Image: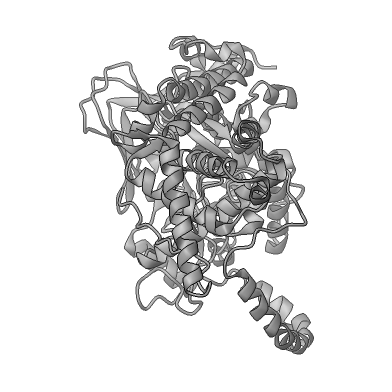
Amino acid sequence: MATASQLKDQFNESTASYLDWLKSRNVDISPKITIHDYTSINQGRGVIALQDIKEGEVLATIPKSALINVKQNLLVTNFPNLKHYLMRLSHWDALIIILLYEFRHREQSHWLEYINVLPQSGFNQLMFWSTNELNLLQPSCVLDRVGQEAADEMYHKMLETVEDLKIDGFENVSFEEYNVVATIIMSYSFDVELTKQETKEVRDQLGVVDDDGDGVDDEEGEDVDGGDGDGYGEEVPELVHHEHDGAHNGTAEVKSLLERNGIPLDEDEEPILHGEVEESEQEEGDEDEADEEHKEDEGEEDDDEEESDDEAGSGSPEILSDGYIKSMVPLADTLNADTTYNNAIINYEADSLVITSIKQIAKGDQIYNTYSNHPNGEILRRYGYIESHGSKGDFGEVPISIIYQFFIERYVIDEIELSHLLQVIGEVSFIEQQEAMEEDNEEEDGGFELVLDSYDCFCTGEVTIELVFLVQLLTTYLTIRQNKDDAEKEEITHDLIKRVYHKIYQLIESKKVTSDLIKNLQEILQIRLDQYPNYASESLNNETSTTSSTMTRDAMAKIVLQSEFHSLKACQQDLKKTLEKTLDSPVKVIADDKLVRAITKAGDKGHIKSEKRGGDNDEGGVKRPKKSKK
């Protein structure tokens, strides 16, 4: 077993070889910086300033020829015929196969010295935590995004893919080996933008037709699956993807969200939106014809199955539809990251990546990049470290289950009834925003998510607008419900929910909220704060882990919980100020009964008009509000 001194020597030798290799690959490094050993503060290799640096100085230029990606790697060097196949895989699938091969045949690799300095063990990403260690993070919502199950699914998918390659070099790939490579990609890869010339070259290599220059394979007519981001496991959204991205598009999605948050459903009752009955009748009328067509097609299915599999990935690949290549970028990934101390930026140019200082840097200071404004919990999940002073992107989360339970108790509503109400709210909000996008000719994919797994409360004292909207909508609707007799309470009508939705939209757009919204949101945030252990309320220590060489996982978990608690507290302590920050405007607080009267009055008028027209209009005569320009 090597001594500490021997390990130190090996570390320094690898660093020296790496620096020589970088220069041999035409990486231009400023004499004002070099690679430095930061293992004493748990930061591995980093980049240090050897001299004072001014803002705007170029610190390094990395030619694209030094990168590892789908265009250049050992696998396509040894098997050129695989390049076309790899380019049609997703970003993630392609790079993980490429890097696995590079690791397994490192002695043949042109990137040997680079591979030797990439970490092989000692990972602190949540994927590597035990169950007991993960429990230290309770009640953080980051636990819902660890992605153990998703990683297993992706591992088996990768095994199937490499089996299809039918080449030597991927025998007996273990889950542990896969996990190491996947973690390295998650922590170190970059999405390198394609230039127009590079896009044209890739398109020509793949034989993709693009006469109109829109990046879409014109022979296929549309893009295939787009990229899902740059985090390990993010291509399995139902297990790992943060639910604030993407969009729900119907009953099944909303029901799935409620179920995974422990909210009971009435399986015998489905929310029915206007138009569904008529559409269902039309569908029934078409069923016979569809059945006949199905029978005719059945005989051809077996013959076509193999061909369909071959064509499944024949549309415009992610590399074209997304306009970037996921790549390993030597030296750029040697920079450590910190949202507070960030003092350098990496820019993409035609043939290179350029590292530039964005502020003055003193001699002896570390050069820091940033991995975007993630909260500490996400930094730990993705990259395996935390910022002891707190991340600039810190936020706490309020799960939908807390909101659900709060309104059950406050407004004495049955569990199934409230669950049903949330389903309809989710569907109405989706349809309304879909219509708004169509009217505005917007090309966004999906709608507005109002019913989410959780709602962000930022350390800056702002909350997501969806939280304000949902709590205001539930507050108003259930106040109206309290004023009805028992018979009326049993029925959740689409018309009433739609009318309340429109009024709340108009209310918030005009920078107004009700007094009960403030009270309810205050209590909801307090309930969430009460779930945290007492030590989470302690102030973040700016010194503890930045200089400590003994940062334990329980210490990291504590800092994550502190970061979340203080973010929630920043939003809860002055709700009116929080709302003004969220809406970026002074907010007027109105009485709830005033809003309720306006909604019920509009409903009565709509009912009278409907009767005069013979009941032809089910919509209640409410005009959909315009989208906010903000």
The residue nearer to you, when weighing 40 against 32, is 40
Q: Residue at x 52, y 24 (%)?
A: 564
**Which image quarter: residue 250?**
bottom right
The residue nearer to you, when weighing 269 against 17, is 269
Give the image's coloring scheme: one colour
Instruction: Say if 182 sits above or below 287 in the image.
Output: above
Total labels drawn: 0
Q: Position of residue 123 (x, y in %)?
A: 61, 28
The residue nearer to you, when weighing 447 against 319, is 447
Q: Position of residue 575 (x, y in %)?
A: 41, 26
The residue nearer to you, when weighing 276 against 381, is 276
Q: Residue at x 59, y 51 (%)?
A: 235
Q: Is residue 413 left or right of residue 352?
A: right
Q: Residue at x 70, y 17 (%)?
A: 1
Instruction: Say if 303 sits above or below 105 in the image.
Output: below
**Which image quarter: residue 34?**
top left
Q: Position of residue 330 (x, y in %)?
A: 44, 39
Q: Position of residue 498 (x, y in %)?
A: 50, 56
Instruction: Say if 8 sits above or below 75 in the image.
Output: above
Q: Is residue 485 left or right of residue 627?
A: right
Residue 18 in view here: no
Q: Residue at x 44, y 9 (%)?
A: 543
Residue 606 in view here: yes
